Amino acid sequence: MHYQILIIGGGAAGYFCAANLDVKPDTRITILEKGRESLAKVRVSGGGRCNLTHACFQNSKLLKNYPRGSKFLKKGFAAFSCEDTVQWFETRGVQTKTESDGRMFPVSNSSQSVIDCLQNSISAPVEYKHATDVVSIFVEDTPIRKFSIRTKDEKEYTCDHLVMATGSNVRVWKILEKLGHSIIKPVPSLFTFHIDDERIKDLQGLSVPKASVRISGEKIVNEGPLLITHWGQSGPAILKLSAFGARVLADKAYKFELEVNWVGKKQKLAANELDDIIEEHSGKVILRNAQFGIPARLWERLCVAANLQDHMRYRDLNEKNRLKLLAQLCASRFDVTKKSTFKEEFVTAGGVDTSEVNPNTFESKLVPQMYLAGEILNIDAVTGGFNFQAAWTGGYLIAQSLNTL
């Protein structure tokens, strides 16, 4: 069966490409999806609400949320940004809202609104084939270029233009390697840390608003809210660190030392603030009077770790006690023993080397008429709607390129 355009992958990038196609009525188009339903990741995103993008409307700031791919995406975001995404969905009936952390969701609080919008926005004559697992792709150049796609159920499809939007798929990466592309070895990104430590034991649910975290011995540092969980630590600060440190942590087999600054301030500034606290709360028991916005139970654990006595008052702090407390507040060290997946969102760092893809059209530089978008590329972001934004941008630019044929 021959098609002018064939899209492999019924996820965000693939569907957004299809939804932006404006081609001749007789153009034959199909989407091949490995799963039994399309847009599965869209459905579960944001706990079923779909965090479709982020209210980061300044592209220079937006790009800082991509540990890998920021340079490649610069031109793409200039053509189709977060603001364009919001406008695209709202003009098609999906009103959005922005939460305090900048994440954007449909007002309906349902990913089904986004799914319905994508499906209803496809005006081109698209055929859908689910439970269709691609096992090989061949390029034929005589008499004109076309692609031959074979599936696990031994069906064969041919097409003039091929869109690869399969997400993180090892088999597809191997197929693309055979076609000449370089694959950056995939490793997990966006994960939480397993920590067994008395200072945080049984404190799950407690959080600090602005912690600073770093991997000991490395220059990778991130800050933001930090959440204590029953298995260790999570929250935006930890997730960002896991993203920007994805390759370093993989090399360490996810066993490393984590440094946590609970107050999110340099030790010198924290020391000055502590001096003011000592003067103001001189007669108060230290363990019973938490400071720096740290939850009371966590504050007590940190004080115990600094060897402060139960009855000790702020006026009793000598220089040695003061330095030990500051060390716990600004440089607590934890042994991380392993990682775990963050909710339903599994993101990988790795994929097709973006230097082999045209940043203006997302067309392969090595295989003309083949386009790549989404997590199949070596592009990934921190949590907050940024990975979807990269998928929307890629799908949109591919569609614009195909619309000119």
Image (cartoon, grey):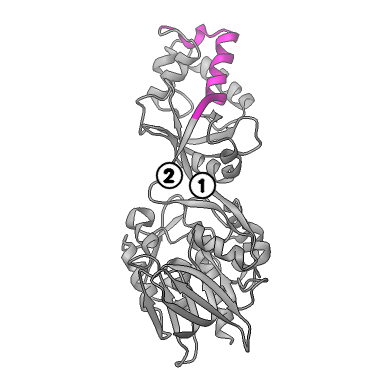
Q: What amino acid does circle 2 point to?
A: Thr
Compared to residue 108, the image places residue 235 above or below, namely above
In the image, residue 330 sits, relative to residue 322, either above or below, namely below
Find disc 2 in the rendering and name its residue: 341
The numbered mark at residue 188 is 1
Q: Quadrant of the C terminus?
A: bottom right
Marker disc for residue 68: none
Left or right side of 317 for 35: left
- The reply to whether discs 1 and 2 touch (Cβ–Cβ < 8 Å) is yes
- Secondary structure beneath label 1: strand
The image quadrant of residue 256 is top right
What are the residue bounds of the magenta stretch? 311-336
Please, what secondary structure does the residue beneath circle 2 have?
strand
Q: Residue at x 63, y 83 (%)?
A: 141
Three-letter amino acid code of the residue under disc 1: Pro
Q: CA distance from mark 1 to mark 2?
A: 9 Å
